[in-house]
Image (spheres, rainbow, N blue to C red):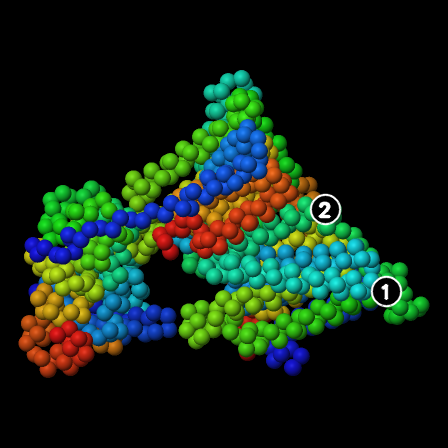
Amino acid sequence: MTALLSLSGVHTHIGRYHILQGVDFEAAEGKTTMLLGRNGAGKTTTLRTIMGLWRASAGSVAFAGQPIAGLPTPSIARAGIAYVPETMAVFSGLTVRENLILAARDGALDDSRLQWIFGFFPALKKFWLSRAGSLSGGQKQMLSIARAIVEPRRLLLIDEPTKGLAPAIVGALIDCLKEIKRAGVTVLLVEQNFRVAQEVGDDVRVMDNGRIVHRGSMASLAADATLQNRLLGLSLDAHQ
Amino acid sequence: MSATTDTGAALPRPKIDFAPALAPFLIALIAAPLIGSTSTFITLTFASLAMGLMLFTMASGFTLVFGLMDVLNFGHGAFISIGAYMATLVFAPLILWSQADSLALNLGVILLAIVVAAAVCGALGLVFEKLLIQPVYGQHLKQILVTTGGLIVVEQLLYALFGPDTIPLGLPTSLRGAFHIGDAAIEKFRLLAVVVGLVIFVGLTLTLNYTKIGLLIRAGVENREMVEALGYRINRLFLAVFMAGSALAGLGGVLWALYREQVHASVGQSLTVLIFIVVITGGLGSIGGCLLGATLVALVANYAGFLAPKFALVSNIALMVAVLLWRPRGLYPAGGR
Amino acid sequence: MMILSGDPPRGRALVALLAVIVLILAIAPFLFPGAKSLNVAATILVYALLVASYDLLLGYTGIVSFAHVMFYGVGAYGVAIALYGLGPSWGALILGIVAALPVSVALALAIALFSLRVQTIFFAMVTLAVASAFNVLASQLDWLTGGEDGRSFQVPEILRPGFRLISGRAFGVELNGRVLSYYLVFIACAVLFLALLRVVNSPFGRVLQAIRENPFRAEALGYRIVYHRALATCLSAAVATLAGALGAIWQHYVGPDTALNLSIQLDVLVMVVIGGMGSLYGAIVGAALFVVARNYLQGLLGALSAAASGAGLTLAAGLLHPDRWLMWLGLMFILAVYFAPTGIVGRLRGLDKGSG
């Protein structure tokens, strides 16, 4: 098993706040690694630091063996990392099509790949020429993920994709995440919904107070209720 | 694949806000009976159209630069002045062309002036952006101060290079005078200004809607960070927009100099005031709002200039206040921010 | 230290510089009996007050206004119109000031409520537009303001040059109405400056600075941002109005070019930045430096320019032309914003810290 992404001793400050206090973990190539933890544990900051949207004040981030900490965000993206932020950040004034055209930065949209995406997100085909701002929350989430996979990328960083979505859409997202994994893409997924984590996760990293407090396989965490309770506390109960 | 309840749901039609776009017609409707004479009304309205499109040309760069990068460039007017002086530089040696009784030569000299002004202002925009604006990204207070300082320095440099006196700039032969439709006069140069302004508006609109760079600009106005996360260097994009905006200001400066038939370094400063009213009224950051704001400002300036000449600028302030009372962010602000 | 509201200049070099400036200004009529020098001194006084009131907005509240000189103009025109219309009496003078103040405050309040609600950057743009319109308006209303020509007027008897306080001389200088005018301006400016110092060191002043540093935090603490910013705008407008009144009393003349022009606004901006934003003492240093430079730097530039044109360097001669002095100050201004955002005052204070 080789690590596609590895963080060691990463510290990040935001203003006066010391958010990440030495984050160490690896994400294996081709696997879906879950990043779990309470609110405020530093999960979103970890993704943003990897993406270069916050600058790490110490430590190193390596992607496919190359150090990427300190690189500007566009260079990190061009190295092959795609980001689906918690806010989805679809360009609401642009159409679905235009959003995807921008995401396909190497040229024209690849039709077979589009058909693959339409397979699990049929809504995007239906609203192809509609403004993204007029989509529902779930559809925006689909568009945001579609943007990340419209061209092949090696690593996806996805931040709480199921937050605030209706159960039926969560099902569609789970299908999509499994499909992405089948395609061999490495995923680092922040998720509060334990059911989703259980279904798609291979490995799991649990954060608390800006550090990784547990590393293991998703299956073993799912089987150990005591460990879940100790590591995830309330966030576990909230989702059961 | 699992069918979701969501995919079948009807999409709400995007609401288009038509009311602000009707404002120019409302103003024309109010002004018409006050002006009385139909021919005067037509003359004034056409003059407004020309002035509005010139203002739009000059203001569009300012508003895009703000929309994309949150940069308020108080030195924008400097490029208008530079463009105006470039016109005098091109016209002086080509006096034979502009005095020839040939529309082609006459338009040629104007086209050349426009190209030179746009090129020089675009290049200087690069210097201005790198030197003055880049070090103070994200700091509004310092941006305002530094770009104001830039305006002072450029204006003084222009005085040093071209002297402090007003330089007259004659219109080419075939653009003097007016076409007459009944009693209404359509000045020839204004017709040219309308054509150039419309070409720029259409060009900008097409660029923003149908080219990848235009999509990137619109996306960047909404969410800079996500554009970077998709792998695009927004600073380069911004630099390009800044240069284009400066070039448009220079182009507008050429038109304005020909419109007033004179050039002075203070023109940039005084037009800055009008441009601010335009973008505040239209809504910062949007091209459509900019066109609407420019049209409104020009209509009010021309009608008021006819009805109560002393209060033309004051009436524009009144317009701005009225709009802000109605829409505190202007008529069509960018990205609904 | 009560008189300085517990906010002394700090820093030995700065204290020394301020002491020299204030001392020279205090005895200027006896030090430089010439009309030009006294005029320079009085201009420094009025500008120092105007700049200090601007700093309350720019330095302490963190908002840029381009309409500050408009309020100065309101004060100046108030005095001019009253004295011109009602004759040179103290009653008319006071009436002019009392009438100008509410006009300024109402204008300031209106601008603030309009533009500060949305974004502070709107404020900069709106003030520029309003100030230009006001300038045009004042130039157009001939019957009231004298139009482009402005208004010359008489001041009350004892402030006129012809008036003698005592028949003899004191330290070799006639104690005429001009000297009395100077001291009227001096004392009024000193009192108002100290009052401003009191304001910025009051709880209100600290709230303004808290808002400037972090608006969101200040709002979370329960301070109403718009209210405080609007109040600061009104207060600074009121002081600018009084500065305008003093300027009018000193000059016996008010016109668009001396009381409303945008170039004066830019001068004020240059003075506050070079002197030092966020410290009222910067206003004194900035105004003194600027006014002296304007009056004497031009001579220096003229000499350099003549030398350059003698050497056949036409462009250099153009750049060094005395009328281009503002360009050099503009460059200094830009450099100050980048490298010395705390201005001369900040640099001098730093000097002291550096030496222990």
Quadrant including the C terminus of chain C: bottom right
Q: What residue is pinned by disc 1?
A: C158
Q: Is residue A98 left or right of residue C86?
A: left
What residue appears at the point 14 percent right and 46 percent down from the top-left corner?
A114
Q: Residues within 10 Å of mark 2 (few under 14, many from 20)?
A: some
Relative to A111, does residue A48 appear above or below in the rendering? Answer: below
* Farthest top residue in view: B101
In primary-sequence order, the first of circles 1 and 2 is 2
Please give the chain letter of the residue carrying mark 1.
Answer: C
- For the point 74% across and 47% down, the residue is C143
Whole-percent x and y of residue B58?
48, 41
Residue A9 location, x and y as percent?
A: 24, 72
Q: Residues within 10 Å of mark 1 (few under 14, many from 20)?
A: some
Q: Residue B309 is drawn in which quadrant?
A: top right
Query: Foreground mark, 1 or 2?
Result: 2
What's the amino acid at mark 1? Ile
Q: Nearer the viewer, residue A141 or C265?
A: A141
User: Is residue B134 at least partly visible in the picture?
Assistant: no
Q: Where is B66 relative to C4, above or below?
A: above
Residue B96 location, quadrant: top right
Q: Which residue has dot 2 on it?
A: C142
Residue at 14% x, 64% y is: A167
Labels 1 & 2 near each other (Cβ < 8 A): no
For the point 37% across and 70% down, the residue is A15
Task: Give, as a three-letter code, the residue at label 2.
Answer: Asp
Q: Position of residue B130 (x, y in %)?
A: 44, 50
